[in-house]
Image (tube, rainbow, N blue to C red):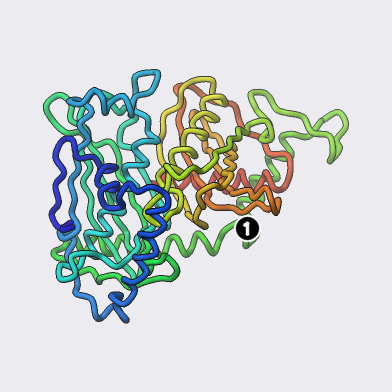
Amino acid sequence: FPFTELLFEQSLLICRVINCLAGYLIFSDHQQAMAERVSLSSMLAKSQNELPAKRMKDSYLEVHLPLGSEPQLREKYLTYHNTVRFGRILEDLDSLAVLISYSHTYNSELKRSPLSIVTALVDKIDMRQHVIYPDCDIKFTGHVTWVGKSSIEAKIHMSQYRDGAYASVLDATFVMVARDPGNKRAAFVNPLKPEGPEEERLFQEGEANKSRRVELSTASLLKVAPTQEERTVVHGLFLNTLDTNTVSFRSRVLPPSSVWMEDAKLKGLEICHPQERNIFNRIFGGFLMRKAYELGWANACSYGGCRPSLVAVDDILFQKPVEIGSLLMLSSQVCYTQGTYIQVRVHSEVFDPLTRQHNTTNIFHFTFTSDRDVPNIMPKTYGESMLYLDGKRHFDQTVAC
């Protein structure tokens, strides 16, 4: 399947390409196909030096989503309010990031790729405009911008055709990882050779993104104490909720125009059916993102009292795969607010009804904005205060960009 310089015009959608790549097999046939893929392990490179360097344009893809010319397709993307379901866009972005990565690792001699490419992280999705029109064609373009030994950074730009020209809608950065055919261990990917100042800038930006992610992980509030400035913020919130009549550590009063954090939650449950599987017989990452986004949006809508607009998605880490048949429990929490902005965190975990165990699979972070000021979110406990600070960190990072 030659991915290089691939152009899918009009009716060839990202999801259809993925389905061609994976094959829509019945469940038993899918398991057999996975068993056959294990034989491809002998084709894996023993080191990255064995693989030829690739250029950024080798992985360039352009995909058209013809919402304007295909009414039947438009129905899949349409909301009740005649807007585009952004959860569907997230699914398409994830699929395209996989295709871009396969384009980079495609072996022209073997006529296939022995690698398994999976989504490791959605580093950032920045919205350039809040409105996505349901009756205008969409264009996705993207390519690899940085690689490590087994990891790949892919940048995707989405634009929409309106008034005779394409206008920017969003920019997305995905981090993918290469695995062996059985998706058991890491595998080497082709090195990347930047050409020209602009490509060199993109590559260096990828290096900086990697360093930033390592720094953020090291400074996680689950590992180290808050900074002095953050401790001052938490103490200020505590003082703002003290009951002046009792002056007690236990007596707390909700300030005006505020909501307790414990009252700003929304939960959901999904049974993971085979229909949502990927080629590795696990639940498709785009499906998880869509469900998390829709729950987070509903929570922000309920909290703000009006339909919110998405500003950014960042730091979605795929910690563990979700197996078919799993009970997927999603919990959204408004964790930080400022003016018209609402920061929502969605926690995803798999529940095993037999062992009664809960295992975290994903953490999602969404920044929304409302058309009016929203109530201040107020933590009560130390744990909620850490959620507040974590939300503030993500919000500050979004604003800084």
- Give the secondary structure at mark 1: loop
Q: Position of residue 10 (x, y in %)?
A: 15, 35
**Residue on which disc 1 sits:** 222
Q: Quadrant of the N terminus?
A: bottom left
The residue under the point 61% across, 54% down is 359
The residue under the point 16% across, 44% down is 8
The residue under the point 14% across, 65% down is 195
- Taking the image as shown, residue 184 lies to the left or right of residue 66, namely right
- Taking the image as shown, residue 388 lies to the left or right of residue 53, namely right
Farthest residue toward the top? 81
Q: Position of residue 261 (x, y in %)?
A: 66, 35
Q: Position of residue 164 (x, y in %)?
A: 11, 27
Say if residue 200 shows up in the picture. yes
Q: Nearer the viewer, residue 50 or 237?
A: 50
Q: Amino acid at mark 1?
A: Leu
Say if residue 149 shows up in the picture. no
Q: Nearer the viewer, residue 341 or 235?
A: 341
The residue under the point 26% across, 59% down is 102
Vertical placement of 261 versus 358: above or below? above
